[in-house]
Image (cartoon, rainbow, N blue to C red):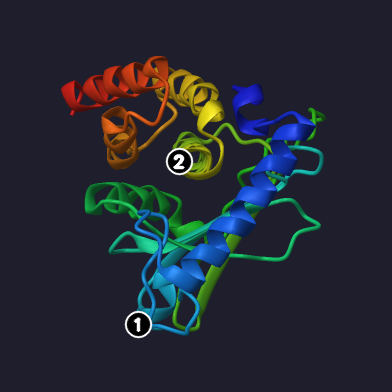
Amino acid sequence: MIASLAMTRAWHGRVARSIGRILLALLAAGFGLASPLFARSPAGKSATPIAIRASPQAPTITYRKVFKSSYPEFVEIKLNESGRGTFDLRQLNEEASPQPFEVNASLAARIFGLAAKLHNFQGVDLDVHRRIANLGEKTLRYDKGAETHEVKFNYTLDDSAGQLMAIFEGLARQATDLSDLERTMRYDRLGVNDVLQQIEQDYNNKQFPEPERMLPALDQLAADDKFIDIARQRARTLAGKIRSSR
């Protein structure tokens, strides 16, 4: 469990992903990616995070984790009740680059339901207050108009907080894996199979809150003969598993 929360990656993986995110952000701003991680924007304007268009009175929940020497070192996901928001996954020395993000209505309802059990983080103490390893500082925050509540912790035994953390950590892993797959499909076709192996492992470990978000990219890969047969077959098999489990 601790290894899953840390999300450590090799140094060369950090560099490749950092370059990939920069390229994807540039493409999103200039050409409007078809990826579900990005929203199309008017010509000549940069992509605008979906959450900015929400009503200022609409409640939002933010999960933030700061964990130096991990990958990514900074995770921040913001969602409103409709399931729209932004995510920002990066190293601490990189500039903030929140990207549009969306989850389905049932998952958004579950997130806000768990937050309600924690009184929307008002006056709660979630940390175990024991001497344990540093697992990264987590923050859960609730905003609605002028109302703001947040709680910080390193590790918690609270069941509702643990479920919330697992959901957000899963969304971060899901977004990272999908971004890696889209990047390699565009720029590194020989690396696609390695990324698929990681995605398959994460799926088998039930780390994706919404594995169906992977289907468009997997289907595209499986149908494109520019990729090696082993990668196409792996994508086809994984897409079949995801569909059969829905």
Front in this rendered view, residue 78 or 20: 20
Describe the element under mark 2 as helix, strand or loop. helix
Return the x and y of residue 33 as percentages of the image width and height.
40, 61
Q: Residue at x 74, y 51 (%)?
A: 91
The answer to whether one can see residue 163 in this image is yes
**195 sits left or right of 238 in the view:** right
Mark 2: which amino acid?
Leu
The amino acid type, in three-letter code, at marker 1 is Ser
Q: Quadrant of the C terminus?
A: top left
Select label 2 or label 1 by which is in front.
2
Q: Which of the two residues, 119 or 8, is positioned nearer the viewer here?
A: 8
In the image, residue 152 above or below residue 170: below
- Look at 81% across and 57% down and name the residue there: 93
Q: How many marks?
A: 2
Mark drawn on residue 64 = none
Q: Which residue is mark 1?
A: 55
First-in-chain label (2 vs 1): 1
Q: Is residue 141 above or below residue 185?
A: below
Residue at left offset 37%, top offset 82%: 42
How crowded pointer 2 is (Cα within 10 Å; few <14, some 14-19, many 20+) is rated as many
- Residue 12 placement: quadrant: top right
Q: x%, y% of residue 83?
A: 32, 59
Instruction: Between residue 151 and residue 224, name the one nearer to us.
Output: 224
Q: Which residue is mark 2?
A: 178
Dot 1: few (<14), some (14–19), or many (≥20) neighbours within 10 Å?
A: few
Q: Position of residue 65 (x, y in %)?
A: 65, 49
- Above or below: residue 71 compared with residue 63: above
Q: Position of residue 230 (x, y in %)?
A: 40, 14
Q: Is residue 71 visible?
A: no
Q: Secondary structure at mark 1?
A: loop
Residue at 38% across, 47% down: 114
In the displayed image of the protein, which residue is found farthest to the front? 226
